[in-house]
Amino acid sequence: MDDYEELHAKSIADPEAFWAEQAAELSWQKSWHSVLDWNDAPFAKWFDGGKINAAENCLDRHVADGRGDEVAIYWVGEPGDTRNITFSELLSETCRFANAMIARGVKSGDRVLIYMPMVPEAAIAMLACARIGAVHSVVFGGFSATSIKDRLEDSEATTIITADGGWRRGNVVPLKANVDEALENYDAVENVFVLKRCENEIKMTEGRDAWWHDATADMSDFCPAEGFDAEHPLFILYTSGSTGKPKGILHTTGGYLTGTATTFKYVFDHQKDDIYWCTADVGWITGHSYIVYGPMANGAAQVMYEGAPNQPDWDRFWQIVAEYKVTIFYTAPTAIRAFIKAGDHHVDKHDLSSLRLLGTVGEPINPEAWMWYHEKIGAGRCPIVDTWWQTETGAIMITPLPGATPLKPGTATRPFLGIDAAILDETGEECGPNEGGKLVIRKPWPSMLRTIYKDPERFKETYWNEYEGIYLAGDGARTDDDSYFWIVGRLDDVLNVSGHRLGTAEVESALVSHEAVAEAAAVGRPHDIKGQAVVAFVTLKEGIDHGDELALELRQHVGAEIGAIAKPDDIRFTQTLPKTRSGKIMRRLLKEIVSGGEVKGDTTTLEDFNVVASLQKED
Ligand code: WTA
């Protein structure tokens, strides 16, 4: 820990020196002339003048090092089919697919939407985009046609990469059919590549759609890895904010790769013989940074699993850990809580002695879940790295360093090297120990988001307006007497449902798009397994009666508008919603009602005092 203190102090005294040293571990085609250009803050340029290819760093480099025959991905399909893919094979497939895209006119800078199951081709598609400088935007396979369309319109993507379907809990998720639905009355998409995965019946549109296997059949497995500017966009990933439309978080190449590669190496203490497994989906930032770019830049061997944790039963993960002798396992607290509920006998069936390090991400981990993870999965032997970070930060920001940081259940502990995290009060003063405040990052870091796609004003307003030149994370936090960071949760109207970000405004806008709904307010309620569950208060249009069916119909409607994760657990019909005199819905009151029933705090701005009383009665 003393070493950490010293290294950290040095790294934030001169972050540019620290990050330049890390970036130099990557393979650059041309060196940078400046490490950080912050003149146009908050628009950062890292490693300006440098040229780099992300795919080359993830693939060619390891093959050139003589590691081509080593397995990069141990893939496990949900139905039980498996594939082991070496670095050489991954490189050839990436080149072939990159050539297929080039042959169909995809160029550097074009946006490519990826909507895939968790199959190796999802990573191949991302790396193929990176190889040719196309900007990928992965859409989680659980999102709906409407969500695809919103992202298509915003990103102006002209190419889609998808599959006929993907396996989930024994069912086929109709990915291609969802894409077709998104493309009804929308003709800006020129190419749809379709991987055959489930052999389910699909429609192909002549001229626009091509099977992956046909498109790559005659392609060479050589595709040059052009060096792109360090600031060339690598991807856009949409994430929920406080408005109805998700924002496109833009990451660029050199800095993002530096951040993800460095954190992967140190936080997971990655060694040559490790078998790493991150259970995230590539549709989220964790899949981008800690399945694709971070591990692959380090040449890690990893497990990739297609399906659900309980298919066919709740021991599926442990069976995979035992079979592949996984050494590092990275998952979400919500999954851990679900395993606790499913029962220890699922764990006891398997030999987990290969594990040496555990990690969590996505939400605060409750001490009970931490203890179970530590004792039951880690046999009291494996450190747990509780990693705090965001889609926006690109890479892990607050985390223990295994072996160095003394652990405490429930805290992500201390900032990573080169990261100047702090907690500030309303006036911008740093909070003392045990004083709650706003989590910020005071100095730029290489994997930081560069902007919100096509909306630089929103970028400034959302993250940089509260404190001059300082990044506002949107989380509330405090430090303890050991300067450990305890993350309390979001300060904005963003929920964390099963470790996934969801804006209450998105759920509300989905609800009011239904013909029966006049107004809606969505809030979070604590939930044993999901962390938070969505509860929606709904007022109906004049003359409409909710009957028995409408709640169900509205849940389905939200599922179709956004995706299954956004479906409210509970829909409550009400005559009116509590509002301030200026007409703002008082979500705080609703939150108090759904989490305990008792309304505390100030209600003096409430327009109609009877509203709360009646909502509580309905409760
Ligand atoms: C929350 C996921 C507590 C936090 C990588 C953050 C966490 C949001 C942790 C980002 C953690 C993530 N402890 N809270 N270890 N990790 N969060 O963009 O509220 O999907 O702002 O990125 O998740 O979610 P996102």
Image (tube, rainbow, N blue to C red):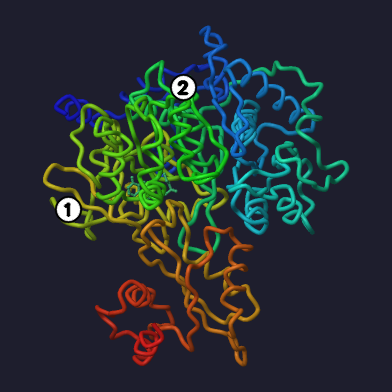
**Residue matched to label 1:** 431
Q: Residues within 10 Å of mark 2 (few under 14, many from 20)?
A: many
Q: Position of residue 244 (x, y in %)?
A: 53, 64
Q: Residue at x 34, y 73 (%)?
A: 588
**Residue matched to label 2:** 300
Front in this rendered view, residue 19 or 362? 362
Residue 241 in view, yes or no: yes
Q: Position of residue 408 (x, y in %)?
A: 20, 42
Quadrant of residue 16 in the image? top left
Three-letter amino acid code of the residue under disc 1 = Cys
In the image, is residue 137 above or below residue 85?
A: below
Quarter of the image for the N terminus: give it: top left
Front in this rendered view, residue 266 or 112? 266
Three-letter amino acid code of the residue under disc 2 = Ala
Front in this rendered view, residue 39 or 293? 293
Q: Position of residue 460 (x, y in %)?
A: 43, 52
Quadrant of residue 542 in the image? bottom right
Q: Is mark 2 within 8 Å of ligand 1?
A: no
In the image, is residue 42 above or below residue 539?
A: above
Q: Using residue 216 as the reference point, say whether residue 343 is left or right of it.
A: left
Q: Is mark 1 within 8 Å of ligand 1?
A: no
Q: Nearer the viewer, mark 2 or mark 1?
A: 2
Q: Residue at x 27, y 38 (%)?
A: 374
Q: Earlier in the sequence, mark 2 or mark 1?
A: 2
